[in-house]
Image (cartoon, rainbow, N blue to C red):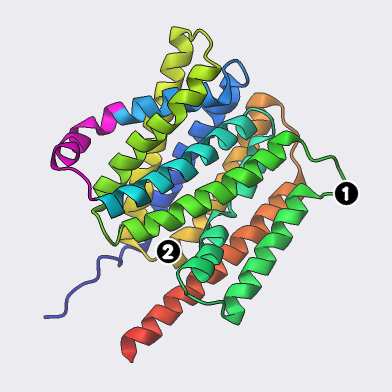
Amino acid sequence: MTSISAKNHPVEGVLWMLATGIAFVFVNGIVRYLGTALPAAESAFIRFAWGLLFLAPSLMPLLRSGISPPLFKLFALRGALHTIAVMLWFYAMARITISEVTAIGYLNPIIVTLGAGLFFGEGFRPARMAAIGVAMLGALVVLRPGLRELSPGHLAQLGAAFGFGLSYLVMKRLTQLAPASTVVAVMALSVTIGLAPFALAVWQPVSLTQLLWLGAVAVFATAGHYCMTRAFACAPMTVTQPVTFLQLVWATLLGWSVFGEAVDPWVILGGAIILAAVVFLTWREARGERVKGRI
């Protein structure tokens, strides 16, 4: 009897990825709504503290059993990178349009690919270099340096994209050494600890409403990651990845209808260019794995 691959439900995978995009747009919308009322570090700390509360049951057994020193160093490195990226993302989200944050965020997989070539010895084949070049072109279309003034929010989101990309690169290594549930739980703990001193340095009184909204951010973010995991389990990334472009569409509609943000066609075009590069890269990598599997 022939075994059936787990990735043979493309329609289900697309639906899960649609749910992923909607969940993350809710995350963006809530953070945009809260704006600059709280410092970025404080908002980020409260959001991750909520997430840590949700993950506490899976974290307790790990803390009792302990973590080996080499693994601890990798967890600490990922926690530091993610902490910086999260603060920059919260800062950017309150200062530039939701569509710009979303479009620039599409650079994350490109940063992972670039880092894998530099640090993991995966090389720079012509197709990879072309995809990276096209993605950078898309970023220039979004930002348009020289044609408009770049705000600190734009620079912060670029920094966040690099920080998240490097964090995911370390995660790629960690998933080879520890279960996925452990990697997620320790990230929540390390980022909460990493954010604490920054949050305390700028702490302002928090209302119950703000506290509950940031709890909702944690809920939607957790739901988004869960839906993404289910999407990847149902269908190849070459099927699910193009659906993420709709996240930019939803983000643009949300910014326009709720926050009165102008629809910028250059941001949509740049985001589409970046995503096209990501989809091409994903397809090439998947094709390469299939070819190696037949050798």
Q: What secondary structure is marked by label 1?
A: loop
Which amino acid lies under the numbered mark 2 shown in the image of this protein? Met
Residue 105: x %, y % from top left: 58, 48
- 58 is within the stretch colored magenta: yes
Q: Residue furthest bottom?
A: 295
Towards the viewer: 10 or 277: 277
- Tell me the quarter of the image containing the N terminus: bottom left
Dot placed on the residue nearer the N-terminal end, 1 or 2 = 1
Q: Is residue 43 above or below residue 252?
A: above
Towards the viewer: 215 or 4: 215
Q: Kindly identify the residue that appears in the image at 45 percent across and 19 percent down.
A: 213
Name the mark on residue 146. Answer: 1
Separation of residues labelled 1 and 2 (CA atoms): 36 Å
Inspect this view and state whether residue 275 appears: yes
Towards the viewer: 5 or 129: 129
Q: Is residue 197 above or below residue 114?
A: above
Residue 191, image quadrant: top left
Prevalent SS, magenta region: helix
Q: Kindly identify the residue that appears in the image at 25 percent across and 46 percent down.
A: 182
Q: Kindly identify the residue that appears in the image at 55 percent across and 33 percent down.
A: 87
Inspect this view and state whether residue 12 appears: no
Which residues fall within the magenta stretch? Answer: 53-68
Residue 106: x %, y % from top left: 58, 53
- Tell me the quarter of the image containing the C terminus: bottom left
- Residue that numbered label 2 is attached to: 237
Left or right for 151, reference 257: right
Q: Residues within 10 Å of mark 2 (few under 14, many from 20)?
A: many
Q: Residues within 10 Å of mark 1 (few under 14, many from 20)?
A: few
Residue 192: x %, y % from top left: 39, 30
Name the mark on residue 35. Answer: none
Q: Is residue 35 above or below residue 56?
A: above
Q: What secondary structure is marked by label 2?
A: helix
